[in-house]
Image (cartoon, rainbow, N blue to C red):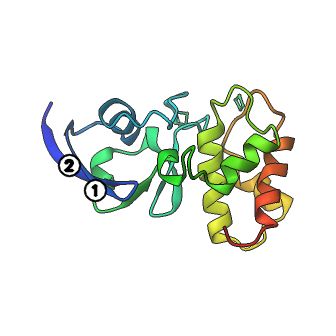
Protein backbone atom coordinates (compact mmCIF):
# COMPACT_ATOMS: atom_id res chain seq x y z
CA UNK A 1 0.00 0.00 0.00
CA UNK A 2 1.45 3.38 -0.93
CA UNK A 3 2.07 6.09 1.60
CA UNK A 4 2.55 9.80 1.26
CA UNK A 5 3.26 12.85 3.40
CA UNK A 6 0.13 14.90 3.82
CA UNK A 7 -0.02 18.22 5.64
CA UNK A 8 -3.33 18.88 7.32
CA UNK A 9 -4.46 22.09 8.98
CA UNK A 10 -5.84 20.96 12.31
CA UNK A 11 -7.11 23.43 14.89
CA UNK A 12 -5.18 26.16 13.15
CA UNK A 13 -1.84 24.36 13.02
CA UNK A 14 -0.15 22.56 10.11
CA UNK A 15 0.37 18.88 10.94
CA UNK A 16 2.38 16.72 8.55
CA UNK A 17 1.77 12.98 8.67
CA UNK A 18 3.08 10.03 6.66
CA UNK A 19 -0.09 8.16 5.92
CA UNK A 20 -1.41 5.32 3.79
CA UNK A 21 -3.53 6.47 0.88
CA UNK A 22 -6.58 4.86 2.41
CA UNK A 23 -6.26 6.33 5.93
CA UNK A 24 -9.43 7.95 7.16
CA UNK A 25 -9.40 11.34 8.80
CA UNK A 26 -10.62 9.67 12.00
CA UNK A 27 -7.62 7.32 12.05
CA UNK A 28 -5.17 10.13 11.48
CA UNK A 29 -6.68 12.40 14.13
CA UNK A 30 -6.82 9.73 16.80
CA UNK A 31 -3.91 7.41 16.05
CA UNK A 32 -1.33 9.79 14.58
CA UNK A 33 -2.15 13.19 16.04
CA UNK A 34 -3.42 11.91 19.41
CA UNK A 35 -6.57 14.02 19.17
CA UNK A 36 -8.72 11.42 20.88
CA UNK A 37 -11.58 13.78 21.68
CA UNK A 38 -13.02 12.69 18.34
CA UNK A 39 -14.63 9.34 19.07
CA UNK A 40 -14.47 6.10 17.16
CA UNK A 41 -17.91 4.56 17.16
CA UNK A 42 -19.43 2.53 14.37
CA UNK A 43 -16.92 3.30 11.58
CA UNK A 44 -19.91 3.10 9.24
CA UNK A 45 -21.29 6.61 9.17
CA UNK A 46 -24.21 5.73 11.41
CA UNK A 47 -23.49 6.99 14.94
CA UNK A 48 -22.10 10.49 14.40
CA UNK A 49 -19.51 10.17 17.19
CA UNK A 50 -16.62 10.95 14.84
CA UNK A 51 -17.91 14.33 13.62
CA UNK A 52 -15.38 17.11 13.13
CA UNK A 53 -15.61 20.40 11.26
CA UNK A 54 -14.07 20.73 7.82
CA UNK A 55 -14.21 24.37 6.76
CA UNK A 56 -16.85 24.87 9.42
CA UNK A 57 -19.11 22.07 8.20
CA UNK A 58 -19.67 18.91 10.28
CA UNK A 59 -18.39 15.80 8.52
CA UNK A 60 -18.12 12.20 9.64
CA UNK A 61 -14.39 11.66 9.84
CA UNK A 62 -14.74 7.87 9.58
CA UNK A 63 -16.05 8.31 6.03
CA UNK A 64 -13.49 10.84 4.78
CA UNK A 65 -10.03 10.05 3.44
CA UNK A 66 -7.51 12.16 5.30
CA UNK A 67 -5.65 12.97 2.09
CA UNK A 68 -8.80 14.63 0.73
CA UNK A 69 -8.83 17.14 3.58
CA UNK A 70 -5.47 18.67 2.68
CA UNK A 71 -5.98 22.39 1.97
CA UNK A 72 -9.03 22.49 4.24
CA UNK A 73 -9.43 23.72 7.81
CA UNK A 74 -10.13 20.90 10.24
CA UNK A 75 -11.49 21.64 13.70
CA UNK A 76 -11.80 19.00 16.39
CA UNK A 77 -13.28 19.33 19.85
CA UNK A 78 -9.78 20.14 21.12
CA UNK A 79 -9.81 23.19 18.87
CA UNK A 80 -13.12 24.53 20.17
CA UNK A 81 -12.11 24.92 23.77
CA UNK A 82 -10.40 23.43 26.77
CA UNK A 83 -10.64 23.45 30.53
CA UNK A 84 -9.11 26.89 30.81
CA UNK A 85 -11.12 28.46 27.98
CA UNK A 86 -14.13 26.28 27.19
CA UNK A 87 -16.57 26.91 24.38
CA UNK A 88 -19.87 28.20 25.82
CA UNK A 89 -21.46 24.99 24.55
CA UNK A 90 -19.09 22.91 26.68
CA UNK A 91 -20.06 24.99 29.72
CA UNK A 92 -23.75 24.59 28.94
CA UNK A 93 -23.47 20.83 28.42
CA UNK A 94 -21.92 20.56 31.87
CA UNK A 95 -24.44 22.87 33.53
CA UNK A 96 -27.48 21.18 31.98
CA UNK A 97 -26.27 17.65 32.60
CA UNK A 98 -26.26 17.07 28.84
CA UNK A 99 -23.34 14.65 29.02
CA UNK A 100 -23.61 11.34 30.83
CA UNK A 101 -21.14 8.75 29.57
CA UNK A 102 -19.82 11.52 27.31
CA UNK A 103 -19.09 9.38 24.28
CA UNK A 104 -21.37 11.33 21.98
CA UNK A 105 -20.57 14.70 23.53
CA UNK A 106 -17.59 15.94 21.47
CA UNK A 107 -19.45 15.38 18.22
CA UNK A 108 -22.65 16.86 19.65
CA UNK A 109 -20.77 20.00 20.63
CA UNK A 110 -19.01 20.17 17.26
CA UNK A 111 -22.32 19.81 15.44
CA UNK A 112 -24.03 22.37 17.66
CA UNK A 113 -21.18 24.84 17.14
CA UNK A 114 -21.62 24.62 13.37
CA UNK A 115 -25.36 25.18 13.79
CA UNK A 116 -24.92 28.23 16.01
CA UNK A 117 -22.23 29.73 13.80
CA UNK A 118 -24.44 29.40 10.75
CA UNK A 119 -27.83 30.17 12.26
CA UNK A 120 -28.56 33.21 14.41
CA UNK A 121 -31.44 31.81 16.44
CA UNK A 122 -32.20 28.16 15.74
CA UNK A 123 -35.56 26.76 16.80
CA UNK A 124 -35.89 23.51 18.71
CA UNK A 125 -36.79 21.92 15.37
CA UNK A 126 -33.58 23.31 13.82
CA UNK A 127 -31.54 21.90 16.70
CA UNK A 128 -33.20 18.49 16.45
CA UNK A 129 -32.54 18.43 12.71
CA UNK A 130 -28.89 19.44 13.18
CA UNK A 131 -28.15 16.68 15.69
CA UNK A 132 -30.31 14.04 14.03
CA UNK A 133 -27.20 12.14 12.92
CA UNK A 134 -25.62 12.16 16.38
CA UNK A 135 -26.78 9.20 18.42
CA UNK A 136 -26.90 9.39 22.22
CA UNK A 137 -27.65 6.27 24.22
CA UNK A 138 -27.81 8.03 27.58
CA UNK A 139 -29.56 11.36 27.80
CA UNK A 140 -32.80 11.16 25.86
CA UNK A 141 -31.65 14.32 24.02
CA UNK A 142 -33.79 16.74 26.07
CA UNK A 143 -30.92 18.12 28.13
CA UNK A 144 -28.72 18.33 25.04
CA UNK A 145 -31.35 20.42 23.27
CA UNK A 146 -31.82 22.62 26.35
CA UNK A 147 -28.08 23.20 26.56
CA UNK A 148 -27.86 24.21 22.91
CA UNK A 149 -30.93 26.45 23.25
CA UNK A 150 -29.36 28.19 26.23
CA UNK A 151 -26.27 29.11 24.24
CA UNK A 152 -28.35 30.13 21.23
CA UNK A 153 -30.26 32.54 23.48
CA UNK A 154 -26.98 34.34 24.31
CA UNK A 155 -26.63 35.57 20.71
CA UNK A 156 -23.33 35.13 18.80
CA UNK A 157 -20.82 33.18 20.92
S1 LIG B 1 -17.70 6.37 13.86
FE1 LIG B 1 -18.17 7.67 12.21
S2 LIG B 1 -20.34 7.70 12.15
FE2 LIG B 1 -19.89 6.26 13.72
S1 LIG C 1 -23.97 10.84 26.89
FE1 LIG C 1 -23.64 8.70 26.60
S2 LIG C 1 -23.99 8.38 24.46
FE2 LIG C 1 -24.57 10.45 24.81
**How many numbered discs sit on the rendered protein?**
2
Kindly indicate whether the residue at mark 1 contacts the one at mark 2 (C-beta within 8 angstroms).
Answer: yes
Position of residue 98 in the picture relative to residue 55 (left or right)? right
- Residue 43 or residue 107, whichever sits in front: 107
Determine if the C-beta at disc 1 is less than 8 A from ligand 1: no
Asked which secondary structure carries label 2, the reply is strand
Q: Quadrant of residue 122?
A: bottom right
Say left or right for 105 vs 54: right
Please tell me how crowded label 2 is: few (under 14), some (14-19), or many (20+) other residues with Cα within 10 Å: many
Residue at image coords 37%, 42%: 25
Residue at image position (64%, 48%) is 109
Mark 1: few, some, or many residues within 10 Å (few <14, many ≥20)? some
Circle 2 residue? 6
Which quarter holds ligand 2?
A: top right
Q: Position of residue 9 (x, y in %)?
A: 32, 56
Q: Tell me the number on the disc at residue 70.
A: 1
- Please, is residue 91 above or below residue 33 in the view? below
Position of the C terminus, as image quadrant, is: bottom right
Q: Position of residue 50 (x, y in %)?
A: 52, 38
Residue 12, position in %: x, y? Answer: 37, 59
Q: Is residue 51 left or right of residue 151?
A: left
Q: What is the distance, in whole Å, between disc 2 and disc 1 at their CAs?
A: 7 Å
Image quadrant containing the N terminus: top left
The residue drawn where x is 75% and y is 55% is 129
Amino acid sequence: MSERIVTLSVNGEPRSVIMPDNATLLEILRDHLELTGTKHGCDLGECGACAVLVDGVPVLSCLVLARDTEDHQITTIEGLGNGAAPDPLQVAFAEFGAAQCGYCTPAMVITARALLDGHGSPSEEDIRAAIAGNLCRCTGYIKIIEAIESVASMGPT
